[in-house]
């Protein structure tokens, strides 16, 4: 399956480097990366263009500042997309290397799918959000209340299904999150097949919890977590310690589990079995 990966960006500057790098390290290699710049400054364009010089799959689509979060530019960008399916990534989040591989599995059978929204809450804790879009009650909650069980970085869809929606990306009302506004269009469309995985395939660093941090401190923090979770044992440790509930997990517990796995060194066959089980 060929993917179009979309990273919308406005004013997060150098934070986008980790997001782009996390896309370029994907084990699923058949993709294009569209960075949709909603009035982003020239410094952001220079960063993206540098990546594009090194990897032709990276493309910058620069627009003037649009209404709200530039949602219409996302729709415009999808008209230029070459992928069978689309995955989204916020410019201040990052994926683990198997995110597209997991999404490819899900979107083979579904029109719209998501993995588990997982956030670094603070320096000590991580939280995985509970819920599955295949659950009718969850879908009703998302349609009728201000409930969103996954953000932009954990969702994707097939392009042929997007083309059948009455309306694609468009500016959200002021009281509705941009992503939830779009998800509701999928939830309202007839005949959509939904898919989901409880696997954590990336990390979100909620901007709302970091409003008091300077741009420099946010960049330092993001780089730190990106480097820490470049260790596959820590990724495996995180996945094994995440409960089905939304209870906080300490990063110390994640590190402990990672060290146990490192000492045990599971065979390749066991590792593949763990991934297959998570995909069911």
Image (cartoon, rainbow, N blue to C red):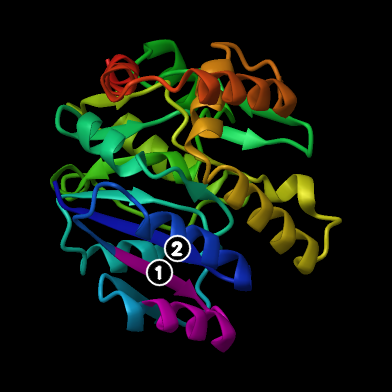
Q: Which of marks 2 and 1 is in front?
A: 2
- The residue sitting at 61% across, 65% down in the picture is 15
Residue 16, given in percent of the width and then of the height, sits at 54, 66
Q: In this view, does 55 lie to the left or right of 138?
A: left
Q: Which of 222 and 252 is in front in this view?
A: 252
Judging depth in this view, the residue of 181 and 238 nearest the camera is 238
Magenta residues, start to end:
33-51
The quarter holding residue 155 reads: top left
Q: Is residue 117 visible?
A: no
Relative horizontal placement of residue 164, taking residue 57 as reference (left or right):
left
Residue drawn at (32%, 64%) of the image: 33
Give me the disc on residue 78. Answer: none
Q: How far apart are marks 2 and 1 (CA)?
A: 9 Å
Element at label 2? helix
Residue 165, how many percent across, how many down? Answer: 22, 44
Whether residue 20 is visible, yes or no, is yes
Rendered image: mark on residue 35: 1
Answer whether residue 45 is magenta in the image: yes
Q: In this view, does 47 lie above or below 221?
A: below
Q: Quadrant of residue 213?
A: bottom right
As drawn, 215 above or below 263: below
In the rendering, at what x and y percent does residue 222 appear?
A: 66, 55
Image marks 2 and 1: residues in contact by CB distance under 8 Å:
yes
* Residue 251 in the figure: left or right of residue 81: right
Name the residue that disc number 2 marks: 20
Which of the marked residues, 2 or 1, is nearer the chain's N terminus?
A: 2
Residue at point 77% right, 45% down?
Answer: 209
> Which quadrant, please, contains the C terminus?
top left
- Mark 1 closeness class: few <14, some 14–19, many ≥20 residues within 10 Å: many
Give left or right: position of 88 versus 194.
right
Residue 82 in magenta stretch: no
């Amino acid at each position: 399956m060929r993917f179009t990966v979309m990273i919308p960006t406005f004013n997060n500057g150098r934070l986008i480097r980790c997001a782009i790098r996390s896309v370029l390290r994907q084990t699923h290699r058949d993709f294009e990366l569209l960075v949709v710049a909603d009035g982003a400054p020239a410094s952001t364009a220079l960063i993206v263009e540098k990546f594009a010089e090194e990897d032709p799959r990276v493309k910058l689509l620069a627009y003037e500042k649009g209404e709200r979060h530039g949602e219409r530019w996302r729709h415009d960008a999808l008209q230029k997309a070459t992928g069978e399916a689309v995955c989204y990534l916020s410019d201040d989040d990052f994926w683990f290397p198997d995110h597209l591989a997991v999404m490819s599995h899900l979107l083979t059978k579904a029109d719209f799918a998501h993995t588990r929204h997982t956030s670094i809450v603070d320096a000590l804790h991580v939280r995985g959000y509970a819920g599955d879009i295949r659950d009718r009650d969850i879908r009703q909650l998302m349609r009728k209340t201000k409930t969103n069980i996954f953000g932009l970085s954990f969702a994707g869809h097939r392009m042929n299904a997007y083309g059948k929606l009455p309306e694609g990306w468009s500016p959200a009302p002021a009281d509705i999150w941009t992503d939830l506004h779009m998800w509701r269009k999928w939830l309202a469309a007839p005949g959509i097949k939904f898919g989901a995985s409880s696997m954590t395939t990336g990390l979100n660093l909620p901007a709302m919890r970091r409003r008091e941090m300077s741009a420099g401190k946010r960049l330092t923090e993001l780089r730190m977590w990106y480097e820490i979770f470049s260790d596959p044992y820590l990724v495996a440790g995180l996945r094994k310690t995440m409960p089905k509930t939304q209870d906080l997990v300490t990063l110390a517990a994640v590190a402990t589990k990672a060290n146990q796995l490192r000492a045990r060194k599971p065979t390749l066959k066991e590792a593949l079995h763990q991934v297959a089980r998570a995909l069911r």
